[in-house]
Image (spheres, rainbow, N blue to C red):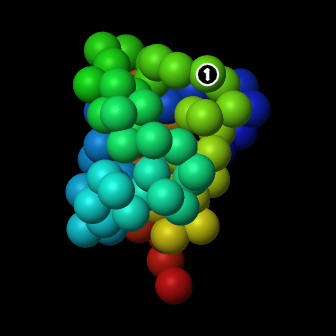
Amino acid sequence: MSENTHPTGRQIAAARTLLGMPQAELAAAAKVSVPTLRRMEASEGPASGMANNVDAVCRALEAAGVEFIPENGGGAGVRLRKT
């Protein structure tokens, strides 16, 4: 995820769901607590939480094969990276 882009809570939840990854698995991969991840995913707008925790979650999702799509006039989103 580029440093100028802050994901939304819905993007994080959508990315995790796309991967079929339970919250506990993502939280462990990002080294954050499950309640912290739940708060991020429940955020309206940009994911709430400490920037280092949001970055850790995004890195874990990207390592698992997700790409975050920034707002470009068509809305922010996520997709699986081509293999």
Classify 12 as above or below 24. above
Residue 9 visible to an observer of this rendering? no
Residue 46 visible to an observer of this rendering? yes
Query: Which residue is at the front of the view, 79 or 53?
Result: 53
Left or right relative to 81: residue 52: right
Q: Tell me where residue 73 sits by quadrant.
A: top left
Query: Which residue is at the front of the view, 68 or 59?
Result: 59
Q: Residues within 10 Å of mark 1 (few under 14, many from 20)?
A: few
Residue in the image at 28% along x and 47% along y = 14
Q: Check disc 1 and give the amino acid type.
A: Met
Q: Which residue is mark 1?
A: 50
Query: Which residue is at the front of the view, 7 or 28?
Result: 28
Left or right relative to 58: residue 40: left
Q: Position of residue 38 (x, y in %)?
A: 31, 34
Residue in the image at 30% along x and 43% along y = 13
Left or right relative to 19: residue 54: right
Q: Position of residue 39 (x, y in %)?
A: 34, 25
Farthest residue to the right: give it.
Answer: 3
Q: Tell me where residue 18 sits by quadrant.
A: bottom left
Regarding mark 1 in the picture, which secondary structure is present there?
loop
Q: Tell me where residue 55 sits by quadrant.
A: top right
Residue in the image at 66% along x and 25% along y = 51
Q: Position of residue 54 (x, y in %)?
A: 57, 34
* Quadrant of the image containing the N terminus: top right
Classify 24 as above or below 1. below
